[in-house]
Image (spheres, rainbow, N blue to C red):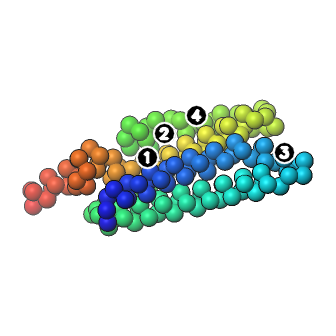
Amino acid sequence: MNRDKLKIEFWGAVLCMLLMSLSFLFMPYASDRSLEGSALPLRISGVWFWASLIAGYGLFLFADRGRKRLTVKRKNKRPGILRVFSNKWARAADIACAVSVCCFTVSALTDPRGYAEYIFLSTAVFTVQMHGVLNGENFSFFAQIEMDGKTGERKTDERKERRK
């Protein structure tokens, strides 16, 4: 499996996750136009949401499967959604996730009809996804490829192999 293709699939998945999250910002407009009798924005909103959701997680699964073919399986490794602060990018995503979920909760309780609620919902959905992605094995694999000069071999794994 070509590592560059896997990297494109991984970052394409992240882009689709962002697009899916941004679809929440269009939903109030689509809903208002629907009440005025125009169903097109509502349909666009639905297609945008579902297409980016399916494409994003489909690409993520393809990248995950390809990464698993190239790496040695680790024992007792928790999924990214259950880990926190596993690297500097994940730390930033975890903090942003906590802040955005709190902001969404506060805005939903204080002003349930305001547009700020949709902004915080969009942000919360994206940061929760990034919490899982950036704490996961796929991100650490692709980040390591960048650091190792695109060889795809982890330096720590090479040292262990040399010792044997």
Q: Which residue is drawn at 23% across and 47% down?
A: 149
Q: Can you name the residue that lies furthest to the left here?
A: 163
Q: How far apart are marks 1 and 3 (CA)?
A: 36 Å
Element at badge 2? Answer: helix
Image height check: is 61 above or below 144? below
- Does label 3 or label 2 sit earlier along the sequence? 3
The residue where tag 4 is placed is 99
Image height check: is 37 above or below 127? below
Determine whether, in the image, residue 58 is placed left or right of residue 71: right
Q: Residue 42's x, y, as percent?
A: 78, 53
Q: Which residue is drawn at 34% across and 51% down?
A: 142
* Amino acid type at image mark 2: Ala
Q: Residue 59's x, y, as percent?
A: 48, 60
- Label 1: how many residues lie within 10 Å, few (<14), some (14-19) or many (20+)? many
* Amino acid type at image mark 1: Leu
Q: Nearer the viewer's eye, disc 1 or disc 3?
A: 3
Q: Distance between the residues labelled 4 and 1?
A: 17 Å
Marker disc for residue 32: 3
- Does label 2 or label 4 sit earlier along the sequence? 2
Determine whether, in the image, residue 70 is placed left or right of residue 53: left
Q: Residue at x 72, y 52 (%)?
A: 45
Q: Residue 58's x, y, as percent?
A: 51, 63
* Amino acid type at image mark 4: Val
Marker disc for residue 134: 1
Q: Distance between the residues labelled 3 and 2?
A: 33 Å
Q: How far apart are marks 2 and 1 (CA)?
A: 7 Å
Residue contact at pointers 4 and 3, CB within 8 angstroms: no
